[in-house]
Image: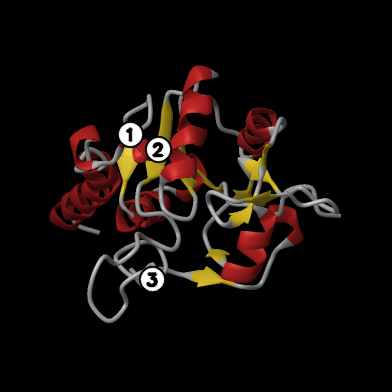
Amino acid sequence: MNRRKLLSLATATLAALLLPVATAFAVTDADLPEAKRSDARLYLTAKEADAMVRANPQRVLFLDVRTRAEVVYVGMPTQADANVPLRLEWGDAPQFDQEKKTLKQRDNPDFVAEVGRRLAAKGLAKDDPVILLCRSGDRSASAADLLFAAGYKQAYSVVEGFEGDVAKEGPTKGQRTVNGWKNAGLPWTYAMDPAKMYRVN
């Protein structure tokens, strides 16, 4: 390979590696409702998260922090390293949340420890990027807060989540069709890999 082609290849590779870093700050606190803001202040759109993972998959930990039921019934990004739920289902005795019109969830006391186990298994450290994705960006911000407090330097929240935000008008009003992993046409699957699931034998 001649020198010109080598230089061109090196430039393209460097641009691919820097692109996610350069675009990671396209979303700021000012652009987000309070529930989607995190102490780390590191935000990604679904497309930016996908680009960051594709650019250097071995140097990024990509976690889906939704409940196991959500992952099973709604699907999961194909490239996600694991499902580590921020909150857990109540199990055999679910409790109903009258205000939210849904079943209550409880905090996962093992969340930070499990993220640490997944990080170590991939040979990464707390200063490596960790991308967190939930349904629409609220829980991923809370997850980023927990990791940031635990010393993680690059806890990124995917602000659109897997399903996206709710449309406020038009024929899909009330449905999650505005943005998000699925709506962006990014790769996802219903097929679960037991090795990626939280505490599944």
Q: Which residue position holds label 3?
A: 175
On screen, 72 above or below 116? below
Q: Amino acid at mark 3?
A: Gln
In which quadrant of the rendered view does residue 39 lie?
top left
- Write down the quadrant of residue 186 in the picture: bottom left
Q: Is residue 67 left or right of residue 50?
A: right
Q: Does the CB distance between marks 2 and 1 fall below 8 Å?
A: yes
Give the CA separation, mark 1 to mark 3.
27 Å
Task: Determine whether, in the image, residue 41 is placed left or right of residue 113.
Answer: left
| Residue for badge 1 | 42
Q: Are marks 2 and 3 in contact (CB under 8 Å)?
A: no
Whether pointer 1 and pointer 3 mark residues with C-beta atoms closer than 8 Å, the reply is no
- Mark 1 vs mark 3: in front: 3
Label 2: state its secondary structure: strand
Residue at which label 2 appears = 156
Tell me which amino acid carries mark 1: Leu
Percent of width and height locating residue 69: 68, 60
Query: Can residue 172 be seen?
Result: yes
Q: Residue furthest front?
A: 98
Q: CA distance from mark 2 to mark 1?
A: 5 Å
Q: Earlier in the sequence, mark 1 or mark 3?
A: 1
Measure how far apart labels 2 and 3 are at the Cα level.
Answer: 25 Å
**Could you tell me residue 139's position as x and y percent?**
49, 42
Tell whether 74 sits left or right of 162: right
Q: Earlier in the sequence, mark 2 or mark 3?
A: 2
Neighbourhood count class around disc 3 (C-alpha, 10 Å): few under 14, some 14–19, many 20 upward? some
